[in-house]
Amino acid sequence: MARTILFVDEEKFVHKALKRSFRRMRQEWDMRFAVSPSEALGILDKESIEVVVSETVFSGQNGLDFLKTVREGHPQSARIILSGYSDRDVVLKTVDLAHQYLSKPCEDDDLEATIRRALMMKGLLEQEALKEIVSQIEALPSLPEIYTQLMETLQSEDASIEQIGAIIARDVGLTVKILKLINSSFFGMRQQITHPAKAASLLGLDIIKAVVLTTGTFDKFKHLKFRGMSLEQMWEHAMLTGAFAKIIARRSGLDRNAADTTYMAGLLHDIGKLLIAAHLPDSFAEINAMAARETIPMVEAETAILGATHSGVGAYLLGLWGLPDVILDAVTLHHKPAVTAQETIDCTTIVHIANALAVSGQKIHDPRVSISELDYDYIDKAGHMDDLEEWKSECAEYVRSGSDH
């Protein structure tokens, strides 16, 4: 069955160019074209559109208002901006309105890859209702104390990029927001940026301030209460997993950039759990209760109740936002790394091990105790059983000492 794509641009020569460029895709894509937001909304009201590719500037109509309407009224549609308008303030306003931002002129291969990626990530979730909920997410919960600290630092006359980067690195919601922005084609990075401190240094204080002060990342979830697990517990686990992942990456000989990426993947590995807790609180409580009552892994309870796991939910959103594949793979497969069939140490393997060690609690201190969350068969086939004990010891020492690695 053909996938449905809607292109919205008032320049008809752009329509002709797109039809010519993607003529070979006619068997795979059912393409629709609109010259205005009002025409596009008429199509969206009549048909199920999977991906909307839109300009931001139209004569007499507001492209940003159109994207907001699509987000609210048709949340199942992935939203991609393809714009020749390069005003920075407009780009900043699109951070919450689109999953991806592409600048004109855009290579056909880049646009095709972005659309394919959006379609692929939509396939991660099978339940339509859950797709709609995830598609509507604008921001992620953030710890109030981090918000306070960041705002105080931003208002300081001697605030530095290093200080801002360090604070951003402690917050999941802001980290994703900043990485999404820096990796958009508007900023023209030649390679994916995966560490918030690097992103902060490239964006600069003015843009960081604009993102923090205008997107409302924090206020939306400032008073959020979870049933079954606290926001602080989630964050502590994410931080510990990230720390363990970086320790293992370094001990495995990965270079600094790869180790930083692995840290970020560890930090974001449970992002889907956070999304479920924030947007499906009743289901989240039911999942926790079922897992405790039947002593089954949380992912099994999630599948039974939602028809999807937090791994899929997290990867779906991060994929739409354009984070690197290496992070998506680790988020998607951190509970089942054997799917990758890798026989070398990689980010997914490291995050799987780091997560299992972070969950193990006091078991990490006893080398004689096996950890149920670890896929020992996979680790053995990959040739890391001997390394595992060393990594476990290093992570246990980190917990004991409380040192920064």
Image (spheres, grey):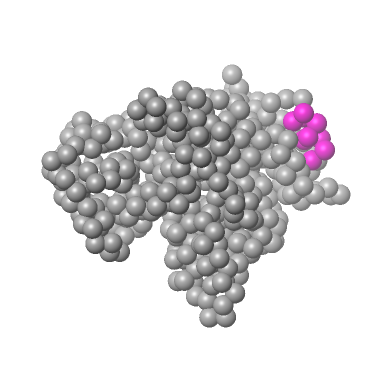
Q: Residue at x 59, y 54 (%)?
A: 222
Q: Is residue 258 above or below residue 378?
A: below
Magenta span dominant secondary structure = helix
Q: Residue at x 20, y 30 (%)?
A: 377
Q: Is residue 17 above or below residue 189?
A: above
Does residue 217 appear anywhere in the picture?
A: no
Figure quadrant of the C terminus? bottom left
Question: Percent position (x, y) of residue 227?
Answer: 51, 40
Residue 280: quadrant of the picture: top right
Left or right: where does residue 191 sit relative to residue 102? Answer: left
- Nearer to me, 251 or 86: 251
Question: Percent position (x, y) of residue 292?
Answer: 39, 31
- Nearer to me, 52 or 11: 52
Task: Name, please, the residue furthest toward the bottom.
Answer: 158
Task: Name, please, the residue furthest toward the right.
Answer: 60
Residue 203: quadrant of the picture: bottom right
Range of the magenta residues?
37-45
- Nearer to me, 245 or 295: 295
Question: Percent position (x, y) of residue 258?
Answer: 33, 54
Does residue 38 show up magenta in the picture? yes
Question: Percent position (x, y) of residue 356?
Answer: 29, 41
Q: Is residue 135 above or below residue 394?
A: above
